[in-house]
Amino acid sequence: IVNYDTWTSAIGHSNNVSCVNGKLGNNDGNIKFTPYIAGNVTITHNVSTGKTIITCPGIPVTLDQRSGTGGTTSVTATYGAAMPSATMPTRNGYTFKGYFTETSGGTKYYNADGSSAKNWDKTTATTLYAQWTINSHKVTWKANGGHWSGSTADKVVTYNYGATIAEQAAPTRGGYEFAGWSPAFVANTTMPDNDLTYTAQWTANTYTVTLNQEEATTSGTASVTATYDSAMPAIITPT
């Protein structure tokens, strides 16, 4: 490893090595060169062919996860080559889109699955930015035998992750009283990173039923409490 500024003709080349537009090279055609950033280079000389290959240092790339976690934070890219292997970050409630040159828009260099989207083409240290799409999920409200203004169809509302969920108006059902939701709905609940379903619960109405025995000689049950849509309770019949 030597610094390009101090390389001399010690390995058999009289031409000066210079930096031109981010490239390292000379004029005699014997040196192969690649773009580089400031730093050390590796010089390999093949005695049998007389060829000298200069390998320039990789280019550091910072990966700004932008609230993501668990991914690679930096890589060393090679000019003209696909982006090196890296672990992509994750973020609760968001889907990773890839790494770009800008926080919005810009050029993509990593796909969402971590594969290279573009060969590296910069000669200076660079920061790439994670871009995210907020997840959305459905909240389903089931009438469970009831209805909303005659409609028994489920009520389905889509929310973004973290949004506050508005409680659905209670449905109605003949012969029953609304008894809340299952699971119980808590005010100011925010949307998690998954779908939710709330099912209406019902309590059947009860009624007092008077039994008119007319001219019975032996009295039976005078009244019962009946539950809507249930069998009548047992009674003592009169005679």
Image (cartoon, grey):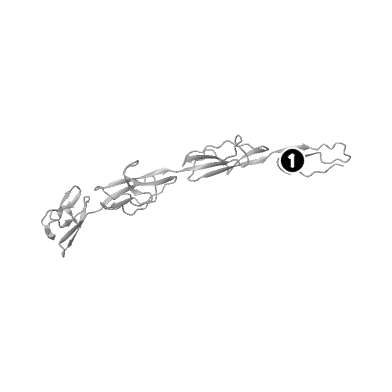
Residue at 42 percent of width and 45 percent of height: 94
Label 1, residues with CA under 10 Å away: few <14, some 14-19, many ≥20: some
Name the element at disc 1.
Answer: strand
Mark 1 lies on residue: 226
Count of numbered marks: 1
Residue that protrudes farthest toward the bottom in the picture: 48
Q: Residue 44: x percent and y percent? A: 19, 60
Q: Is residue 78 left or right of residue 220?
A: left
> Which of the pair 204/154 is nearer the observer?
154
Q: Residue 91: x percent and y percent? A: 42, 47
What's the residue type where badge 1 is placed?
Ala
Q: Is residue 52 visible?
A: yes
Q: Residue 231: x percent and y percent? A: 74, 44
Q: Quadrant of residue 211?
A: top right
Vertical placement of 224 versus 44: above or below? above
Q: Quadrant of the N terminus?
A: bottom left
Q: Quadrant of the C terminus?
A: top right
Q: Quadrant of residue 9?
A: bottom left
